[in-house]
Amino acid sequence: MKYEKLIFAFGITTLMIALAKPFFNQDIIFVLLTISFLLIAILRASYWKHAKLLFMGVFAQRYANQYLREENAFTERVNFITFLLMIINFSLILLKFVPQASLFEVVFFIGGVMLFFILKIGVMLFFGKIFMVQDVAKLGIFFSFLFDRTLGFFIFPLAVMLYFFTFDITITLFLIISIVCVLLLLLKLFWLWKIGTKSFGFSQGYFFYIFVR
């Protein structure tokens, strides 16, 4: 009877320790990657015509202009799907810095990334209203998120390799992701400057202040 009590006490203690330990995020990472893959599959199967225009808009403005002209229910769905992809894949990259994260921390990271982009939209709309250039602010939001959503789409395979590659290539992948992010950032700044100064006649400093911050 004494030994049974000791075994029972040991079992309860072990269970309490297990529950107190952080939730290992490998399972939730797999779920997030699966959701991301499903979104890409939906995009590829049903909305690729519009999604292709969106992604090509990174390299040629005429594609972005055509995407804007074709604004309809399909482009709204593409915007929503690519926004979710951006949130999920950016969160997956950040979560790599937290090898063992609780479920709360995973949700916190995803919520933090989403809040950042929502605040970014809010700030740009706010400055657009202050300076009475609401239409320009909406255009700036589109071109700013054009690059962010494209990056969110194309880093998916890198996110998969980051977590499930045969051997550890974290440093190499982070270097590749950093280079891609810097190149797209420079391209984004160039497009925003070009559109703002040539299409609307803004000074370089004025446009930079409104849209790049």
Image (cartoon, rainbow, N blue to C red):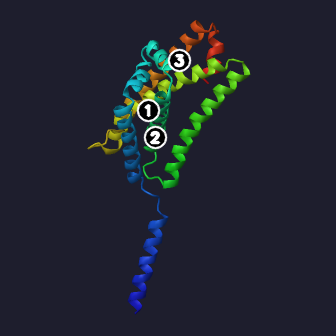
Task: Identify the residue at horizontal 48%, vertical 20% (top origin).
Answer: 70
User: Splitting the image into 4 quarters, where does residue 164 fall?
Assistant: top left
Q: CA distance from mark 2 to mark 1?
A: 8 Å
| Lower sequence index among marks 2 and 3 | 2
Q: Amino acid at mark 2?
A: Ile
**Quadrant including the C terminus:** top right
In-image side of 170 versus 181 (left or right): left
Residues under numbered marks 2 and 1 in contact, where contact means CB atoms less than 8 Å apart? yes
Task: Identify the residue at horizontal 43%, vertical 42% (top origin).
Answer: 92
Q: Position of residue 63 (x, y in %)?
A: 43, 16
Q: Position of residue 104 (x, y in %)?
A: 52, 54
Task: Identify the residue at horizontal 37%, vertical 37% (top origin).
Answer: 42
Give whichever of 182, 73 is nearer the camera: 73
User: Splitting the image into 4 quarters, where does residue 114 fall?
Assistant: top right
Q: Amino acid at mark 1?
A: Gly
User: Which dot marks residue 29?
Assistant: none
User: Which dot marks residue 88?
Assistant: 2
User: Which dot marks residue 189?
Assistant: 3
| Lower sequence index among marks 2 and 1 | 2
Residue at the disc numbered 1: 152
In-image side of 190 versus 129 (left or right): left
